[in-house]
Image (spheres, rainbow, N blue to C red):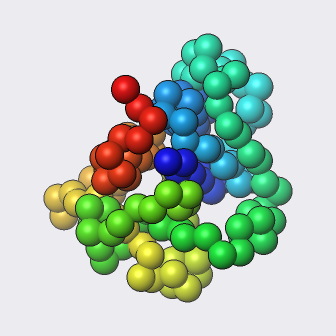
């Protein structure tokens, strides 16, 4: 079982570091789409990821087009507060990609519109002040659901 977490233009170093640590601990590939709001060498990214960086399968892309050209026939899910389906209502398959947007703006609206049926969300209360969960928490919630659906393969 190999899953793929994709971060579109992440902005906050500790979030990416925490996500990198989760990916390393679960054998999940991490894909970062530029521009990044920090350097991958940033001490805050490194600190959050602890000593897991050498365990991480990481790939960085210059832009969204380069990313999609690299995986033309793959299955994608797009995590957004605007998704019509809960993340528990889809089947995460081996090698699928789960994309998350940047902390301040999420994923581009045109991307979400083009892939409406693959948009998923985490349920929350309706409140204009509670707009979304923390990015690293959101990744972990959905990542572990995908792993659970697939019997936690290769994990002990």
The x, y position of residue 5, in whole percent, is 55, 50
How many callouts does the rendering have? 0
Answer yes or no: is residue 18 visible: no
The x, y position of residue 15, in whole percent, is 52, 35
Quadrant where the C terminus lies? top left
Answer yes or no: is residue 130 visible: yes
- Left or right of residue 155, residue 30 in this image: right
Which image quadrant is residue 85 in?
bottom left
Q: Which residue is drawn at 35% across and 66% down?
A: 91
Which image quadrant is residue 89 in?
bottom left
Is 120 situated above or below 49? below
Q: Which residue is drawn at 56% across and 30% down?
A: 24
The x, y position of residue 135, in whole percent, is 45, 45
- Left or right of residue 33, residue 118 in this image: left
Viewer-proximal residue among 68 and 15: 68
- Left or right of residue 137, residue 109 in this image: right
Q: Which residue is drawn at 53% across and 69% down?
A: 76
Q: Residue at x 78, y 71 (%)?
A: 69
Viewer-proximal residue among 153 and 96: 153
Is 42 situated above or below 130? above
Q: Residue furthest left?
A: 125
The x, y position of residue 108, in whole percent, is 58, 71
């Amino acid at each position: 079982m190999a899953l793929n977490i994709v971060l579109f233009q992440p902005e906050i170093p500790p979030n990416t570091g925490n996500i990198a640590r989760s990916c390393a601990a679960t054998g999940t590939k991490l894909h970062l789409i530029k521009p990044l709001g920090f350097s991958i060498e940033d001490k805050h990214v490194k600190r959050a990821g602890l000593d897991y960086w050498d365990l991480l399968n990481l790939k960085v892309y210059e832009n969204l087009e380069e990313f999609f050209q690299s995986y033309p026939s793959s299955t994608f899910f797009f995590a957004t507060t605007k998704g019509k389906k809960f993340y528990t209502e889809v089947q995460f398959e081996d090698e699928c990609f789960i994309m998350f947007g940047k902390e301040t703006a999420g994923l581009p609206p045109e991307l979400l519109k083009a892939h409406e049926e693959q948009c998923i969300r985490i349920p929350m209360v309706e409140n204009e002040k509670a707009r979304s969960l923390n990015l690293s928490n959101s990744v972990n919630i959905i990542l572990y659901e995908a792993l659970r659906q697939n019997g936690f393969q290769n994990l002990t």
